[in-house]
Image (spheres, rainbow, N blue to C red):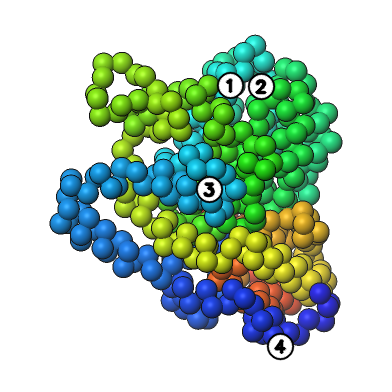
Amino acid sequence: MRDDFPRHLAKELDAADPLADLRDRFVIADDDLIYLDGNSLGRLPAATPAHLDRLVREGWGDGLVRSWPTWIEWGRRIGDRLAAHALGARPGEVVVSDSTSVNLYKLAAAALDAAGDRRTVLVDAEDFPTDRYVLEGLAAARGLTLRLLPSDLDEGLRLDELRAALDGDVALVLLSAVAYRSGALLDMAAVNAAARQVGATVLWDLSHAVGSVPVELAATGADLAVGCTYKYLNGGPGAPAFLYVRRELQSRLRQPIQGWFGRRDQFGMGPGYDPAPDLDRFLVGTPSILALAPLDPALDVLAEAGIDRVRAKGRRLGELIVTLADAWLTPHGFRVASPREADRRGSHVCLHHPEALRISRALAEAGVVGDYRAPDRLRLGPAPLYTRYVDVWDALDRLRGLAERRGWERVPGGPSRVT
């Protein structure tokens, strides 16, 4: 893109955007607010309130317990929709349940229990905290060695670093497809192939990838994955997570939380735990129906858009951030802290500045909602389904004005509660 990218060119990109009309499928309560935090919490789909209202009034209010025969399959049904439209998986390989952290624990524990006498677990040293914490606890409880792989804050984990760490003692590798801080994108097929050569299992965290980049779990030979649904999937705050288990592994793995939803013939209420023979064995308890429900209207929009078109627009939005940051913000002490090549980056971009925390707060006061990531990163996450090119242009223009007058200096620092 041109370094002197004028605003009218951003408007021209919006006029030609094949996804432009989908913005109307979301609630935009304040036209002056520029929302660049869709990688933390997606906007509310416009169809969701009425969808929930019908569920509450008719399904719960009128149907009462008689609605359960329909509800009880929702985690599997919505999992199949995710598999088809966002994850490149087969029917019966994805289910929506619990939280990302709980699903991570379940699948990691199952993989470690099936790993025989292998004693090493590999984790990206800069991965999302819950990923590292869960594996730290599992390794300590089993007397395993947890190795933290060195990873660049801007560029992410290098494949040669991973290959050098892989050997016959590695039981499990836990990695994020898109790095939560920098947006660095890993080659899932290459990672899976490298791990398979030494007999190790890879567990993928897809939280910052699903709904923003094409994920092909089957085609890349993935074994296990988890992820959340409230970011680019727009499932709502705290929406249930999903887990994926390759069909051929389902009967071999046994997860550690033996709840009644994971039992064969669950309504037989038998005396002992006999795990279901398929993906159901990775379920635990009664699903949260009100939390599952918003995923249907959200997935309707994603299915209409198509993940390839979402990815194409996400690349261009990211390229616009990089172009404008280089031209406007570099003279004020900012630098791009994400991979510059669009093919190596998800849909969010990080900017480094020593005062990133105060800048993020000042920027929010100026009507631009991004977020902050330690130690000194401003994270900007345009969501292709509803973010316009002119939104990105205006956001970077407001940030440029803030930088020119050093408008963050009046903003207090201190601990951040941004998630």
Name the element at disc 4: helix
Q: Measured from the top left, where is residue 409 in percent x and y?
A: 65, 68
Q: Residues within 10 Å of mark 3 (few under 14, many from 20)?
A: many
The three-letter amino acid code for the residue at tag 4 is: His
| Distance between the alpha carbons at the discs numbered 3 and 1 | 25 Å
| Distance between the alpha carbons at the discs numbered 4 and 3 | 39 Å
| Distance between the alpha carbons at the discs numbered 1 and 2 | 6 Å
Asked if residue 238 can be seen in this view, the reply is no
Q: Earlier in the sequence, mark 1 or mark 4?
A: 4
In this view, the residue in front, 354 or 391, is 391
- Residue on which disc 1 sits: 112
Q: Measured from the top left, where is residue 360 in percent x and y?
A: 61, 64
- Residue on which disc 3 sits: 83
Name the element at disc 3: helix
- Residue on which disc 4 sits: 8
In this view, the residue in front, 162 or 214, is 214
Residue at (34, 43) in percent of width and height: 73
In this view, the residue in front, 341 or 377, is 341
- Residue on which disc 2 sits: 171
Q: Residues within 10 Å of mark 2 (few under 14, many from 20)?
A: many
Whether the residues at callouts 1 and 2 have beta carbons within 8 Å, the answer is yes
